[in-house]
Image: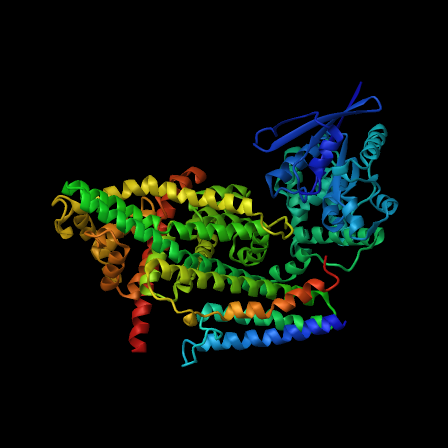
């Protein structure tokens, strides 16, 4: 029960963070938001996906609190989706760096948007906690 | 020595082949079922002085007439050739497997149930009361683990005992409720006293007739004559007054009985979920499942476009160096122009997209191998059934994202002719890999920073138009309802690197091969038409290609496209890969660099014109090979002509609409 509680709390925290990031990402095209590698500016599609991940995390919270295995379903889906989005972003950053080597253009690492990759790192402890949760083969 | 035929029936993936091998050892041969190319395996074994011939039936979930496999299995059992039918059941999933068992019992077959994969059931903590299950089904039930050979002797013994007793009539019947039972009895009365029907279970024939099984209705009509057949049709009408959908009603009643049987014979089972169980809750969810699908598709396209960029630049650099090397070292003007402007520039501008092609297939192969694609088919089925497409159409449509030719060929898995025709006609709207270079080129030039979303919008537009086309076809051209989806969900697993890479290589290398053959030939033709009659260095406005393009240009003037874009579209009829190659030759006739093409296009067109051009390329006829495949698969010139005219007209209408709406929006916003 205690473990479910901590999973639910972590899920809630990540759900809120992803929601905030999703909204910032949506607004970044329209408002003069500050540019920082940890702040998202990925366009509409990435914003909507961040909001989807947020909703999956938040959807899992009440179920985890009731020790319902279905809560783990939504948590796992959110973790996998955030891993995919984060990985794609990291690969894109690597590709941009490689491209600058080939074309000879200057590459400024501080210009890169690493928000999704950062959120993936943030969710790693939840991955570990999930794997230790009993009730999953 | 006595002989006996034993048929092996069962759902797919229940260990039927393992059981067949365990029973027969290496003593078997492989052939085809009469009249079809479905594999038929027959083996032998001996037991207590009897020689048994074992016939492996195709794996099916039921015995209706939805698929060829079902019809083969059903017809073989109906033929009465098999003295005993061994129904192989997955003991970890009795709910699903017992549906076939009930149908076999309803048919009156002499059934022995092989309760296979008992080891997995035990691992899951399931306790199956074999005696209780046997008494509820009123047939012998033998626990087996076919892969280890466990329970095989007991199974042979059960087959022997079932064979040696007189053919018995199982008394276990599915109850369908009083009102429906009255109608079943009325049909049975009509069927009675017809000698041709004596070999069948009349109750089963009556139930299938009321379910509307066309094959069974044909058997009945042939046997009882028109007058009695009319009586049965009247009873069918009476039934439809009572029930909304008889097929669903009969299936529900069988599942109700299965629920009772499973409830009484199974206990235990740990409250543990596998990763597959967990993920399926979300990926098969009607809302979250769809959203996950779109999110994954976005990730696929983002990965394809962004990660490919450095490799594309490297290829571009290589080809520009090759072109300038050829220009510097070949003194003959015509030959130099052919090699640098025609071949290197044209083929290079297509090959530059090789990284994109390989990456998109890599991503799709990863999804396929992980087991996700079956879930995608499942979540899409709900939506597809509503618009009038069978769930199975999702697979050809998915293949269509690679190439439309195998997509159209993949429609062979769709049994219903009308369903198949509709799927063939909409398959070209799935954006194949050959169109991707056009999107990448235009999105990169006109929508920098939003390429992923713009390219995704093309794919979504293709899907949307497929939906609209299906609705149109179902309403006016090919009327009728699609058949339901039956799909095996494989467990999720980590993709095998070897399988994924092999799959990617097979699909991606086909693109490179096309670049070396048809595209090569295409760009040489384009070079010739865009160089002569004036010769190398002459004004492109006075070439054969310019003459052709100018004739057709007025048609496309509303979209603001110049004759060069029109020519590229005309050449795209041969193969879509040629479009970018042709643009390379037409817009950068004097240089071999990608940058030259980009700047020429950028200075000639607006983003709106570029977007409408991309839409046109998406929609109009994919290539000659696709048309040839439509002709071969439909065996009809009429449908091939229909597809051609419809797609070109639709492309024109959509491009015009995009131009008009975009212009209005532009004026409104400024």
**Residue B131 placement, left or right of B480:** right
Residue B203 place in picture, x, y as percent: 75, 41
Visible residue check, residue B506: yes
Visible residue check, residue B408: no
Residue B284, compared with residue B498, is above or below; it is: below
- Depth check: give the residue in front, B398 or B479: B398
**Residue B87 placement, left or right of B236:** right
Residue A136 place in picture, x, y as percent: 72, 60
**Residue B584 placement, left or right of B68:** left
- Depth check: give the residue in front, B443 or B564: B443
> What residue is drawn where x is 65% and y is 57%?
B244
> What residue is drawn where x is 34% and y is 61%?
B444
Image mark count: 0
Q: In which quarter of the image is the N terminus of chain B?
A: top right
Q: In which quarter of the image is the C terminus of chain B?
A: bottom left
Residue B601 place in picture, x, y as percent: 25, 60
- Depth check: give the residue in front, A15 or B591: B591
Colouring scheme, one of rainbow, by chain, secondary structure, one colour: rainbow
Residue B164 place in picture, x, y as percent: 85, 28
**Residue B130 placement, left or right of B148:** right
Q: In which quarter of the image is residue B159?
A: top right
- Residue at the top extreme? B1
> What residue is drawn where x is 74% and y is 40%?
B88
């Amino acid at each position: 029960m205690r473990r479910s509680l901590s999973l639910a709390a972590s899920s809630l925290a990540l759900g809120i963070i992803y929601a905030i990031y999703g909204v910032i990402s949506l607004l970044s095209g329209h408002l003069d938001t500050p540019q920082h590698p940890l702040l998202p500016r990925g366009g509409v599609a990435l914003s909507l996906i961040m909001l989807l991940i947020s909703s999956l995390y938040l959807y899992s919270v009440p179920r985890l609190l009731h020790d319902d295995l279905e809560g783990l379903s939504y948590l796992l889906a959110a973790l996998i989706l955030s891993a995919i989005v984060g990985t794609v972003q990291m690969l894109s950053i690597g590709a941009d760096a490689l491209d600058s080597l080939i074309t000879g253009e200057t590459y400024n690492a501080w210009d890169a948007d690493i928000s999704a990759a950062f959120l993936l790192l943030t969710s790693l402890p939840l991955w570990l906690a999930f794997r230790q949760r009993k009730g999953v083969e | 020595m006595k002989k006996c035929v034993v048929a092996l029936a069962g759902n797919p993936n229940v260990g039927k082949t393992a059981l067949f091998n365990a029973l027969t050892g290496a003593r078997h041969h492989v052939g085809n079922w009469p009249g079809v190319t479905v594999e038929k395996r027959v083996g032998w074994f001996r037991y207590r002085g009897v020689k048994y011939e074992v016939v492996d039936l195709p794996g099916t979930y039921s015995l209706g007439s939805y698929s060829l496999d079902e019809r083969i299995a059903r017809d073989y059992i109906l033929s009465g050739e098999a003295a005993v039918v061994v129904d192989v059941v997955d003991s970890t999933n009795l709910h699903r497997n017992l549906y076939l068992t009930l149908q076999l019992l309803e048919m009156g077959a002499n059934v022995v149930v092989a309760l296979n994969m008992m080891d997995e059931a035990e691992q899951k903590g399931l306790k199956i009361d074999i005696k209780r299950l046997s008494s509820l089904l009123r047939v012998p039930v033998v626990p087996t683990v076919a892969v280890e050979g466990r329970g095989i002797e007991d199974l042979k013994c059960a087959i022997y005992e079932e064979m040696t007793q007189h053919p018995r009539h199982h008394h276990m019947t599915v109850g369908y409720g009083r009102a429906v039972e009255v109608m079943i009895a009325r049909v049975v009365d009509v069927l009675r006293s017809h000698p041709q029907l004596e070999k069948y279970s009349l109750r089963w024939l009556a139930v299938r007739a009321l379910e509307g099984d066309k094959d069974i209705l044909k058997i009945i009509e042939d046997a009882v004559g028109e007058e009695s057949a009319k009586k049965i049709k009247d009873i069918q009408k009476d039934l439809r007054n009572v029930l909304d959908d008889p097929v669903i009603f009969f299936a529900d009643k069988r599942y109700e009985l299965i629920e009772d049987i499973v409830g009484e014979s199974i206990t235990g089972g740990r409250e543990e979920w596998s990763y597959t169980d967990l993920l399926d809750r979300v990926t098969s969810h009607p809302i979250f499942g769809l959203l996950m699908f779109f999110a994954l598709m976005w990730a696929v396209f983002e990965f394809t476009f962004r990660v490919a960029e450095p490799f594309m630049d490297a290829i571009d650099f290589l080809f520009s160096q090759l072109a300038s090397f050829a220009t510097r070292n070949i003194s003959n003007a015509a030959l130099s122009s052919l090699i640098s402007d025609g071949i290197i520039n044209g083929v290079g501008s297509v090959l530059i997209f090789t990284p994109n092609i390989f990456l998109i297939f890599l991503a799709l192969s990863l999804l396929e191998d992980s087991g996700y694609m079956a879930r995608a088919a499942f979540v899409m089925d709900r939506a597809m059934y509503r618009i009038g497409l069978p769930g199975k159409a999702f697979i050809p449509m998915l293949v269509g994202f690679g190439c439309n030719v195998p997509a159209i060929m993949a429609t062979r898995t769709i049994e219903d002719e009308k369903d198949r025709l509709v799927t063939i006609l909409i398959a070209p709207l799935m954006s194949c890999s050959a169109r991707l270079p056009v999107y990448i080129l235009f999105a990169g030039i006109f929508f920098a920073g939003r390429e992923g979303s713009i390219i995704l919008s093309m794919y979504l537009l293709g899907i949307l138009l497929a939906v609209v086309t299906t609705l149109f076809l179902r309403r006016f051209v090919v009327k009728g309802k699609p058949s339901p989806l039956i799909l095996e969900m494989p467990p999720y697993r980590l993709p095998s690197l070897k399988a994924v890479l092999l799959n990617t290589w097979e699909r991606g290398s086909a693109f490179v091969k096309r670049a070396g053959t048809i595209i090569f030939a295409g760009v040489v033709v384009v070079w010739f038409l865009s160089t002569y009659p004036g010769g190398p260095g002459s004004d492109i406005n006075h070439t054969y290609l310019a003459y052709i393009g100018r004739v057709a240009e007025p048609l496309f003037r509303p979209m603001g496209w110049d004759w060069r874009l029109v020519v590229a579209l005309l050449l795209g009829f041969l193969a879509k890969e040629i479009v970018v190659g042709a643009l390379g030759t037409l817009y950068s006739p004097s240089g071999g660099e990608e940058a030259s093409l980009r700047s020429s296009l950028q200075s000639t067109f607006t983003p709106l014109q570029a977007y409408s051009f991309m839409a046109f390329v998406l929609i109009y006829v994919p290539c000659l090979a696709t048309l040839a495949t439509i002709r071969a698969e439909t065996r009809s010139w009429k449908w091939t002509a229909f597809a051609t005219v419809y797609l070109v007209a639709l492309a024109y209408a959509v491009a015009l609409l995009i131009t008009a709406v975009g212009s209005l929006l532009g004026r409104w916003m400024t």
